[in-house]
Image: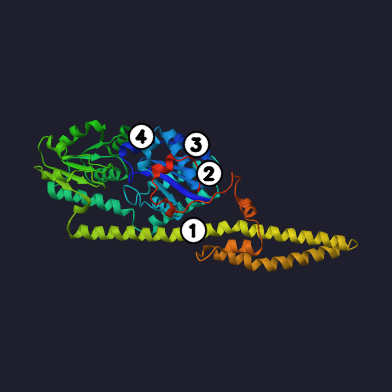
Amino acid sequence: MSLLVVGASHRSASMDLLERVALGDDAAGELAAAVQTGADVAEVLTVSTCNRLEVYVEATAFHGAVHHIGQSLATTTGVEVAELAPSLYVHYEDRAVGHAFSVAAGLDSMAVGEGQILGQFRTALRRARRSGRAGTHLGSLFDHALRVGRRAHAETEIDAVSRSLVQRGLERAEQLLGPLAGRTVVVVGAGAMSSLAAMTVARRVRTDLHVVNRTRATADRLAEATEGTAHDWDELAAVLAGADVVITCTGATGAVITRDLVAGLPQRERVLVDLALPRDVEPEVADLPGQHVVGLGGLGGEEADAGNDGAEAEVRAVRELVEAEVAAFEVARRQLEVAPTVTALRRSARAVVESEMARLDRRLPDLGEAEREEVSRSVHRIVEKLLHTPSVRVKQLAGDPRGDFAGALRELFDLDPHETQAVSAPPTSGPTPLVPESALDGLTLGALLEQPGTSR
């Protein structure tokens, strides 16, 4: 069996699509239940946040699992597979592990380094364990991912990256407009980065703060937390009309503040701080009179450059931490995978001992009970000593990429491979090897999802 993740996030899908596929706790549980009905799925765990929907599975067949996940996503969200497919990503085995660890560490968040995702991972794991859908494999993956996230925040300054961007954006606005006290500040979006911006503004200085978001309930919560005013998305133009400072980070795949939109507003001096990637504000807005656009690449000056260098260093440090943890996890995972072989070896040895003791009983029926027990103990000790070294060494060598040492052990001791799988694997319709990622070259995700659940 092998690990697989299929999902969509702010990096792959439009905000409109993410809002349409967003699932609450109950619906995320329904999705997991639907995925688990697949013949090629052994374990399943779903992660659903405002900016991502991901399905993690331990699968017995790649194509069958991907096809079934795609169909389950379409059924649960009400969005057709053909529309979903272009925005879905697939990660397999070590890439899936790396993805999970990167998400937990805050590297894949809209606001790099935010810690909210750790709570969301804990909730997802708790839900999957409570329902019995996360077993040894996904349970250990997410336990380890949570440890990676905690290490990232404890051992680096990754959570300061987003704060420094917001801080520099506000400082640039003050350079252009003067003090922000009493100014009208509009925050567009209510995700992690926009929430951070709104909180920072509310803490720093008293302003007339407004929050505009596609989902009104989210805007209401953020506005309540910052003593601001919430607005529906169709009020964007009206709210921008009176804005002195606009801070935006929506995660949309195209600009939400266009030149035509701003050109139609009453003329006044505005600073538009665009913290989104891709950009929320069209660069041409800066050509309009009195409009100052400050983007991620233009938070300018020597001090900001030093800050960017520091941010890059923290991101690099977390990436290195994630890479090391992925390697450690893969070694531990391979060691876990050889355990059934070791168990089967010892089971085979016990069967040989029992067979020989039965033969001894037939040859020496008058052997006393005390003598028989002593012979039995001696034989068991000999077998244990003979098996100890290969048992220990195969676990030590499990992480060595140079060879399949568990396979060599099976060959040397003539162990049935199906028996070793049966030691720990749940019953399935028959394990089918997953195809390597190289086999996916030239095959689109849409094509995979449209195929029937077959395996290579």
Q: Residues within 10 Å of mark 1 (few under 14, many from 20)?
A: some
Amino acid at the residue labelled 3: Ala
Rendered image: mark on residue 278: none
Amino acid at the residue labelled 2: Asp
Mark 1 or 2: the one toward you? 2
Closer to the camera in the image, 44 or 68: 68
Amino acid at the residue labelled 1: Glu
Q: Position of residue 48 (x, y in %)?
A: 41, 41
Q: Could you tell me if the residues under marks 4 and 1 are in contact, i.e. CB atoms within 8 Å?
A: no
Q: Secondary structure at mark 1?
A: helix
Determine the CA span between mark 2 and mark 4: 27 Å
Query: What residue does disc 1 label?
Result: 330
Query: What residue does disc 2 label?
Result: 40
Q: Give the mark nearest the N terminus, 4 or 3.
A: 4
Closer to the camera in the image, 358 or 251: 358
Q: Residues within 10 Å of mark 4 (few under 14, many from 20)?
A: few
Q: Give the mark nearest the N terminus, 3 or 2.
A: 3
Q: Could you tell me if the residues under marks 2 and 4 are in contact, i.e. CB atoms within 8 Å?
A: no
Q: Secondary structure at mark 3?
A: helix
Q: Position of residue 327 (x, y in %)?
A: 46, 60
| Left or right side of 372 for 129 | left
Amino acid at the residue labelled 4: Arg
Q: Give the mark nearest the N terminus, 3 or 1.
A: 3
Query: What residue does disc 3 label?
Result: 34
Rendered image: mark on residue 20: 4
Closer to the camera in the image, 191 or 222: 191
Q: Give the mark nearest the N terminus, 4 or 1.
A: 4
Compared to residue 238, the image places residue 436 above or below, namely below
Q: How many marks?
A: 4
